[in-house]
Amino acid sequence: MKDPIERDGLRHKFWEKVPLKNMAPKEWEALCDGCGRCCLNKLEDEDTFEIAFTRVACRLLDGDTCRCAQYDIRKQFVPDCVMLTPKNIDEIGYWMPPTCAYRLLNEGKALYDWHPLISGTAQTVHDAGISVQGWTVPEFEVSEDEWENYIIEDQ
């Protein structure tokens, strides 16, 4: 599988040396591991603020490639799509999956060995079973009041 994220020409191990807020846009984008978990619809408990991920995927997520079909213009199709940035990571990083590079680095943790920046290939996120490849349900097939039936217990 060809990596759709441009990872050539980046500073050596930039993620270990450069704070998130100081990363170049290309470096920021390269942090994405391509798992697709951020595109899963989530339920948040109003009392505990605990996030429950569901198998129900955003209408733009390609369940085979784990990529957004309209990444560059996604807000036009999904106005409430949350776009993670260095400016909002502190506020909404908890909403990202626990394996997410943005969240890990923001919490002072290291990337996993299967991350494409470590492994050198985009395929390792799928091989490690981290991605949503092949097991999502498109949101247009499930009414929102049924999402709780699709909660993922193990993230």
Image (cartoon, rainbow, N blue to C red):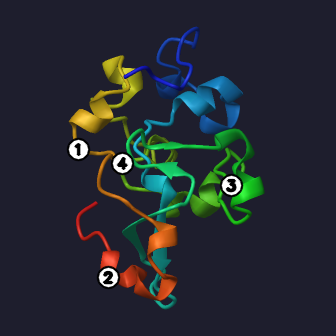
Q: Are marks 1 and 3 in contact (CB under 8 Å)?
A: no
Distance between the alpha carbons at the discs numbered 1 and 3: 28 Å
Outermost residue toward the right in this view = 76
Secondary structure, mark 1, is loop
Give the label on residue 149, or none. Answer: 2
Amino acid type, residue under disc 4 in the picture: Thr
Residue 29 left/right relative to 118:
right
Q: Which residue is mark 3?
A: 88
Q: Nearer the viewer, residue 16 or 40?
A: 40
Q: Mark 2 or 3, which is nearer the eye?
A: 2
Sequence-wise first label, 1 or 3: 3
Secondary structure, mark 4, is loop
Distance between the alpha carbons at the discs numbered 3 and 4: 18 Å
Distance between the alpha carbons at the discs numbered 2 and 3: 30 Å
Sequence-wise first label, 3 or 4: 3
The quadrant in which the C terminus is found is bottom left
Give the label on residue 99, or none. Answer: 4
Amino acid type, residue under disc 3 in the picture: Asn
Q: Which residue is mark 1?
A: 129
